[in-house]
Amino acid sequence: MGKVVPATEESIQDAAVRLRRGELVAFPTETVYGLGAAATDDRAVARIFEAKERPSFNPLIVHVAETAAIAPHVEVSDLAIRLAAAFWPGPLTLVMRRAVGAGLSRLVSAGLDTVAVRVPRHPVARALLREVDLPVAAPSANVSGRLSPTTAAHVAASLGGRVDLILDGGPCLGGLESTIVDATGAAPRLLRAGLVTVDEIEAVAGPLADAPSPSGATVEAPGMMDSHYAPAKPLRLDVSEVGRTEGLLAFGEPLSGAAVTRNLSPAGDLVEAAANLFAMLHDLDAADVTGIAVMPVPAAGLGIAINDRLRRAAAPREPA
Ligand code: TXA
Ligand code: MG
């Protein structure tokens, strides 16, 4: 566990096998080290949040080897095509709409209907992505709230035994995260300042939709904003009984009597529950039920993020 190995052809192959098995692999990019997991695997993606101790499910950036590899997963706008042609491979992340039938874990979008994608330029990242031949979700490889890592030693110090393999590709030359642009509209919207400058983006895609903050400071991550997933059906939390017309979101031994039941984890495993959360909320929301009743989930470890999301989903909202 947590082994640091120099990035070589063999270690990259080993890393790809591990990613396909659902393990966590840290790898260098031109910006910072990423903590990677197969973006198609709910459970593997849930392990990222657990390892980082993220208090809520911030959406993750999905990394692919080539621009063409995003096609089945997102709706590519003209704006996205222009920006991708100019800056990929490189330190630009583009937010696009999720395609219907996208083969990505819902957890990478944290319940939003968009996906953030990037094609990194770093040779080790590219070799790994080509070898694994799957989209790889990767936030910065640090414990939540700490500095982003720019060396393999930073990763080992921050995440230690929680990552299965750390590929050492030397220090990251960028050292600052990618620029994030929302490319779902007609004009580019800056979500996070980063290695690609606003001037460079505007030269390719025209003026930004909203003026960036004067300090150029990072915009709050959407996980912290109000654009979180809320089901259309009313949600009751911490239930100890369930109505016959309700959908039950169970954890552990399920209550009986619900119209439809989805079980986050029959065994009471929080990693499994996190992996299932968004997909099961979507299922119950779409089912023929009057509301969703959620059994208690322990508020420890990954359970804190799960409860945070459930509370947001249950919060009173404005009429649509
Ligand atoms: O340079 C980077 O971008 C590094 C390397 C590893 O690629 N990754 C990185 O990931 O910085 P992370 O998780 O630390 O930051 C990702 C940011 C978060 O602020 C998240 O809210 C935002 O991307 N994000 C992800 N998906 C999004 C989406 N669908 N819509 C809007 N923002 C999104
Ligand atoms: Mg980060």
Image (cartoon, rainbow, N blue to C red):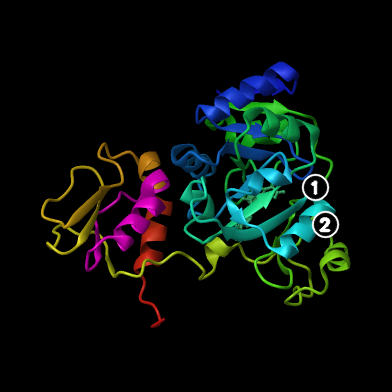
Q: Which mark is residue 90?
A: 1
The amino acid at mark 1 is: Gly
Q: Which mark is residue 145?
A: none
Residue located 70% across and 16% down the image: 10
Q: Secondary structure at mark 1?
A: loop
Mark 1 and 2 residues: CB-CB less than 8 Å, in contact?
yes
Mark before the other along the chain sequence, 1 or 2: 1
Determine whether, in the image, residue 47 is placed left or right of residue 73. Answer: left
Q: Which residue is mark 2?
A: 196
Q: Is residue 118 magenta?
A: no
Q: How many neighbours does mark 1 have within 10 angstroms: few (below 14), some (14-19), or many (20 or more)? A: many
Q: Residue 269 placed where, x, y %?
A: 33, 38
Q: Residue 263 placed where, x, y %?
A: 26, 46
Can you say whether 181 is above or below 25 in the image? Answer: below
The amino acid at mark 2 is: Val
Total residue callouts: 2
Residue located 48% across and 46% down the image: 105
Determine whether, in the image, residue 31 is placed left or right of residue 287. Answer: right
Can you say whether 64 is above or below 308 in the image? Answer: above
Q: Residue 161 placed where, x, y %?
A: 54, 28
